[in-house]
Amino acid sequence: MEKIRRASHAGSWYTDNSKRLAEELDSWLREAALPKSPEVRGVIAPHAGFSYSGRAAAYAFGNIDPTNISRVFLLGPSHHFYTPKCALSTATVYKTPIGDLPIDLEVIEELKATGKFELMDIRVDEAEHSMEMHLPYLAKVFEGHPVKLVPILVGALSAENEAMYGKLLAKYLDDPSNFFSVSSDFCHWGSRFNYMHYDKKYGAIHKSIEALDKMGMDIIETGDPDTFKKYLLEYDNTICGRHPISVFLHMMRNSSTKIKIKFLRYEQSSHCKSMRDSSVSYASAAAKMDD
């Protein structure tokens, strides 16, 4: 029985006009002008409305060589639904305005059998935007290549659970036909986000935010989940995909494939100059096999 997850944010967070959406994505990918590499095994990419983060996201998705990939694991943070675990989709297909992406039911069953995952209701699935915002790019990049999705909603995990899921998923990273799409925005700054860390030594507020984000990005590039945890504890930077990123770092640590993350793009939705301003940061990275 087919169970569809609708493209519930199409028409608001991005256009539901398939022709316009395809043109938009194509132009951003052209602009990023990145060489496609079979060495790229994963990306970290933002998930805001495309008018904010679509251009930045092209610097992640533009690296993908779809030729030998048959499965994409999609790890997104949970914005509305509280769970201390990871949750699996109950859908059989994810719709996008530019093509549908089938779910890999076999892998979902395999993960379910571990007893470590809960299932998310289709309403929870459709309310969450963190994974949906990666779907149009994935549909575009994998056009003409049969690929299946394994969507995993990453809840508010403890450090122990991040390590546990990282260990559990590491074997999938060892299979070169698997790809990983990790969804995260970076600093959410301003009173509306309840976060106003400002180090005056950097000058303007937006420069301080950039320094804070870059510190986090540099740590993520080292691949060390413990140092990333320490950084988050110290600065409490509002990186909404901190748990998916941490799980991915633990996967890398437990995998026999050597992988290196490199950030290729950093943007802010606006430049904060006064304490009344607010912004969200977007960063795109490629996780590449490291010889």
Image (cartoon, helix red, strand yellow):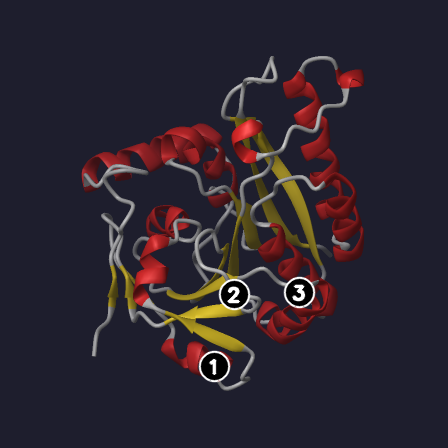
Q: Nearer the viewer, mark 1 or mark 2?
A: 2
Q: Earlier in the sequence, mark 3 or mark 1?
A: 1
Q: Which residue is mark 2?
A: 83
Number of other residues with Cα within 10 Å of mark 1, as a class: few under 14, some 14 to 19, many 20 or more: some
Give the residue type that dot 2 points to.
Answer: Thr
Asked if 168 appears above or below 284 in the picture, the reply is below
Give yes or no for contact between labels 1 and 2 (Cβ–Cβ under 8 Å): no
Q: To which residue does mark 1 refer?
A: 112
Near-viewer residue (139 or 229) = 229
Residue tagged by mark 3?
A: 162
**Quarter of image, res 31:** top left
Left or right of residue 71: residue 168: right
Residue at x-position 55% and y-position 50%:
43
Badge 1 amino acid: Lys
Crowd class of label 2 (few under 14; some 14 to 19; many from 20; radius 10 Å) = some
User: Which quadrant of the rendered structure holds the N terminus?
Assistant: bottom left
Above or below for 74 versus 110: above
Residue lying at 34% horizontally and 36% vertically, measured from the top left: 26
Q: Residues within 10 Å of mark 3 (few under 14, many from 20)?
A: many
Which comes before the other along the chain, label 1 or label 2? 2
Of the 4 image quadrants, the one containing the C terminus is bottom right
Q: Is residue 73 left or right of residue 49?
A: right
Q: Secondary structure at mark 1?
A: helix
Q: What x and y, as percent, mark residue 186? A: 59, 38
Q: Depth check: 87 or 173 in front?
A: 87
Q: Can residue 39 be seen in this snapshot?
A: no
Q: Which label lies toward us, 3 or 2?
A: 2
**In the rendering, which numbered label is found on residue 22?**
none
Q: Amino acid at mark 3?
A: Glu
Of the pair 46 and 25, the residue shown nearer to us:
46
- Residue 22 visible in this rendered orientation of the protein: yes
Is 145 situated above or below 192? below
